[in-house]
Image (cartoon, rainbow, N blue to C red):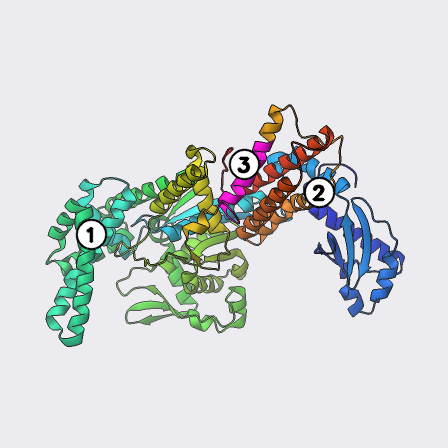
Amino acid sequence: MEKRVVENPSLLLKEKALQFAASTLSEAGIESLEELIVKSGGKHADVSVLVFNLFKKGAARPDEIAQIFRGKQPPSPFREVSAAGGYINFTVDPAAYGEVVLESILTLGERYGFSEAEKRERIIVEHTSANPIHPLHVGHLRNSILGDALARLLAARGHKVKRHFYVDDTGLQVAYAAYGYRVVKHLLRGKPDHFIGDVYAITNLLLELEKLKKEARRAEGEELARINDKLASIAAKLQEYAEKRGEVFQELVREIKGRAEEVEEEIRRINRAYERGEKWAVPLVREMVEKGLEGFRETLGPLGIEFDSWDWESELTVWNGAAHDVVEKLSRLGLVERRDGALVFRADLLAEDEEARRAAGIPPGFQVAPMTLVRSDGTTLYTTRDIAYSIWKLSRADRVVNVIAIQQSLAQAQLRLALYALGFRDIGQRLIHYAYELVKLPGRKMSGRRGEYVAADDIIAETVARARAEIEKRKIGDPEDAWKIGVGALKFFFLNVSPQKPITFKWSRVLDFEQNSGPFVQYAYVRAKGILRKAGEAGAAPELRREKAGEEEKRVIMLLGEYPEQVAAAADQLRPDILTAYLNRLAMEFNKYYDTTPVLKAPTPEKRALRLAVVAAVATVLKNGLELLGITPPERM
């Protein structure tokens, strides 16, 4: 293999193996290219070409293939080739391959790993999109970190990526928060999203308390006991708020006590008026929502998570009539019926059509239910508005990735079926529900209406505090780097598990400095940088021209060459965990290499220069990979 800079060394290696195998077989009279599959090797090879299909089709026998490749000299950077069973096995020469891999990394630097996809697309990644009536919680944190990493990975493949946040500013929940906010906004103190979350919870709890008191007066026996248990639970929660937000609590009590029905009617009036865009309601709701978004930005900004577009639900789907247009079009198609004054989309009937089901990406066996589009009072539901919003996004992108909790799978299936009915026949490929599972916190249940959640701000602050304590305990690095280490640990933790798997949040896993974690990978990077600093102080530097890599470097070099393919796989499959797994393997292999192979005390200056080049390449790849995940590693640790 001639010495040159290549974008994807591992891919080039596979192409050379495939070409050599095909040409050798062709010379023996076996035309085989379409039948061959190439893959990274296992225990017995660095690269293997699979030829099982040739046997199945009777084109060749195993002993014949073995004979054809016996004694053959493969091209550089391969040292040996042999055939056994259904494999043609290639052994890489670390001297030749190392030259290409190391020069490519050291020349390309921060661009190493960025390879354009064959088909570049306009892609919208919509993520977080939390309801602005309470602060972001730990579940939203997983959503935000996943969405940001997906956007970064897709951009690394040359796609034109836009990050969108859908501002849910309509609906009854928002009206509840807006009502309470109107009463106590003059008491706003501290982070605004936390204030709004408390106001929303207190308002809901007080209204629920009033309703339960009314029910208790008519109940008896077991029913009365059940209601009293609920009353006691609500009273205990309200007492917490009385201590936490004294003035706010007292004002809301004065406003709501004895007036539950009147207050509920006012909340419904706010909801209806805002959907109609009435002048008195718009400033009220907008002010409250903007305060909530201000709090979100305060949380996400320091994490490096930003958005290109904040898409207001009211503007894009309600005030312009887009949601009602959706209802009318579906009605004309005969897919809407009236039930008790509400309009219902018969998604269940459409799902019986196999073509519709396939095109909408509905999994076999998944049960689809009818979907209410419009309530009896004329207001639309969230998913109705989401259909209109999806049409807006699809007009601006080739593909839309919605990062939404797996609990919304039914609503997302109904949405795709509605879009299929409206003419988007390729909707299953264009609108992707990137489903992620819940984050479980042992001993905790979450409810926004009751203010029972673990705020993202609290998780972040605790992670950083624990990272600082670990730094001081281990006497490593600078406590000032606790933010980078802690936030990096948190991001790696959430990205290191397939999104389809639930996560149980454990501090011991988040801040594990020993294996398979953000701190572990960060420490490997810092270790590499430390070696390079010490070498520089001694007047030594990475150098490739005077020495070649040997067997001791081979495992690290093979992994380094894989990096661009790992990035491509993580992006194309929408699997950030592919990249975290790779970075962990590289960190482990580098640690083994440094622990067993003298670098600064190498036997010759030439060997030291070559090994420093390996260390520099590892540092570059670890940093590139971490930054693709939104993690900025510290320089010292």
- The residue that mark 2 highlights is 552
Alpha carbon separation for disc pair 1 and 3: 45 Å
- The residue that mark 1 highlights is 240
| Residue at 17% from the left image edge and 62% from the top image edge | 232
Q: Which mark is residue 526?
A: 3
Vertical placement of residue 432 versus 62, above or below: above
Please state the extent of the stretch shown in magenta in the rendering.
Answer: 513-531
Q: Is residue 328 magenta?
A: no
Q: Quadrant of residue 102?
A: top right
Is residue 588 rendered to the left or right of residue 201? right
Mark toward the viewer: 2 or 1 = 2
Looking at this view, is 417 or 569 the one in front?
A: 569
| Residue at 25% from the left image edge and 44% from the top image edge | 283
Locate the N terminus by quadrant.
top right
Q: Closer to the N terminus: mark 2 or mark 3?
A: 3
Q: Closer to the N terminus: mark 2 or mark 1?
A: 1
Q: Secondary structure at mark 2?
A: helix
Alpha carbon separation for disc pair 2 and 3: 22 Å
Q: Which residue ends up furthest to the bottom in the rendered image?
A: 221
Asked whether the viewer can see residue 116, the reply is no
